[in-house]
Image (cartoon, grey):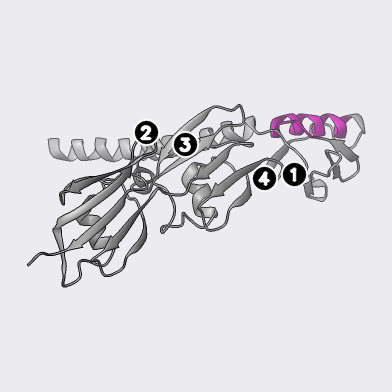
Amino acid sequence: MRTDNNTRKTFLWALLLVPLCALATNAAIANDTADYRLGAGDLLRINVYGAPDMSTDARVAQSGTITCPLIGSVPVAGLSTSDVEQLLANKYVEGGFLKQPQISVLIVEYQSQKISVLGHVTKPGQYALRDSVHVLDLIAEAGGVIAASAADRATLTRADGSKAEIDLPKLFDGDPSQNYAVAGGDRIYVPKADQFYVYGQVQKPGVYKLDRNMTVSRAISASGGLTSRGTERRAIVKRRGPDGKEQEYSARSTDLLQPDDILFIKESLF
């Protein structure tokens, strides 16, 4: 009997938590929308309850106005949706069209505020701000990063000039601390990755992307592996020092490569 009571309590708590979670989500979305300031290109859905003929979809013109049934042109640029609701209600009352209008305004398309996604992504460009947009959403909308050339860190530059670094591997692994919320005027930049060079006794000599923790052994694998005459034991790294002069080092398989290193694999002596 005690078990049945506990089960009932658990079930009742579950019933209570579902609507509470929904309310919290809706409240968060409402707060984001309330902070958004309308501008040219935004599309609004206006519902006038009890008067369906007055309900309409209206796009904000370049002049910052929308056109509504009966009351005509209304300036809305720079206003929030709640501001517009109150403004329309007042105009319908002042015009003698409605006594106590109940009006809701929803943003259907966010076009006036743009976010730039630049650098080594598939489709760099400007993207319209939508409700509750985050870094991962914008990178996905830009077609994702170009795996062969993109660095593993990106930069988020805010409209006020402040910056945040984004660890892309952590972001793609689902780390919420890297998935920053973005706002109109922000810019996401994915730079080109550092490179290194591999020559000598490897299958595919050339230039390669310097991944995080790239060792000599991994670099050889990236370049197709050793030829029949190559040996890891005779690896040489050529590296420029702070003074710009090139220096040469004997390298072990576990040594980490640095940007612009030249890895040279010599022939085996035996």
Using the image, determine if residue 96 lies above or below residue 128: above
The kind of residue on which mark 4 rests is Tyr
Tell me the residue at 53%/33% (across/down).
27
Q: Nearer the viewer, residue 184 or 118?
A: 118
Q: Quadrant of residue 6?
A: top left
As measured in the structure, the alpha-carbon distance from the residue carrying label 3 to the one carrying label 4 is: 19 Å
* Label 2 SS: loop
* Label 1 SS: strand
Can I make out residue 129 in this image? no
Q: Which residue is mark 1?
A: 46
Marks 3/4 in contact by CB < 8 Å: the verdict is no
- Please give the range of residues in magenta: 76-93
Q: Which residue is mark 2?
A: 242
As measured in the structure, the alpha-carbon distance from the residue carrying label 3 to the one carrying label 1 is: 31 Å
Q: Which residue is mark 3?
A: 180
As measured in the structure, the alpha-carbon distance from the residue carrying label 3 to the one carrying label 2 is: 35 Å
Q: Earlier in the sequence, mark 3 or mark 2?
A: 3
Q: Quadrant of the N terminus?
A: top left
Please name which of the two marks, 1 or 4, marks the residue nearer to the observer.
4
